[in-house]
Image (cartoon, rainbow, N blue to C red):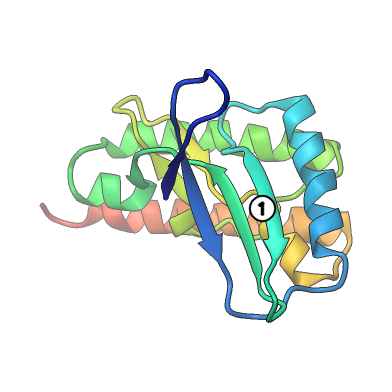
Amino acid sequence: MFVVREDGAVPRLLRLKRWHTPAPAGFVDGFERLRAQLQEWRPPAIVLPVTAWVDAHGRPSVVTDFRQGMPLLESVRSGWLHPDRARSGLRQLQEILDAAHLRGLAHGSVVPNNVFSARPDGAPYLLDFGFGVLLSGSGTPSHWAAADDEGQVRIQAQLQQVSSEPR
């Protein structure tokens, strides 16, 4: 993460993510299309991407806005977030994913470490939206929508397991 000061603006925290695998052909162009669609839509639970590039070795990097928080399941496991609030937040996320799918967008990697929470009300947000799809270089919108739904089901099952663990 690093701080960027735009002309006359308040400093802004950003998050840098780098991959060690080669970027598929068209990664940056696909990223720009995704960024434009998300900027137009501006869903509150999706951390917006800022920029992307491919380094001299062909490995992709992406910068997104930074959000403070921790993975949703860790929030429950630590006792910071009540399981009922986490379940409610996951239902909200499913609505956002459904809306994304209607727009032809998919996350592509709905896994516990990409579902964060920073507020006690359990409102979650998604990191790395669409990067799984971009990095794969394949799949159809319906394929990725189904993968998002499967990821959501796995997180719900893990949440059930975490909520039943003794504290």
Q: x, y (%) of residue 47?
A: 56, 38
Of 41 and 35, which appears nearest the observer?
Answer: 35
Residue 151 visible at all? yes
> Measuring 33% from the left and 29% from the top, which residue is drawn there?
119
**Three-letter code for the amino acid on which mark 1 is drawn:** Asp
What is the secondary structure assignment of the residue under circle 1? Answer: helix
Q: x, y (%) of residue 108?
A: 69, 58
Of 38 and 88, which appears nearest the observer?
Answer: 38
Q: x, y (%) of residue 71?
A: 37, 50
133 vs 142, left or right, is left
73 vs 147, left or right, is left
Badge 1 is on which residue? 149
Of 138 and 112, which appears nearest the observer?
Answer: 138
> Measuring 58% from the left and 79% from the top, which residue is drawn there?
20
Residue 163 visible at all? no
In the displayed structure, would residue 25 be above or below residue 35? Answer: below
Of 11 and 92, which appears nearest the observer?
Answer: 11
119 vs 53, left or right, is left
Q: x, y (%) of residue 110?
A: 58, 56
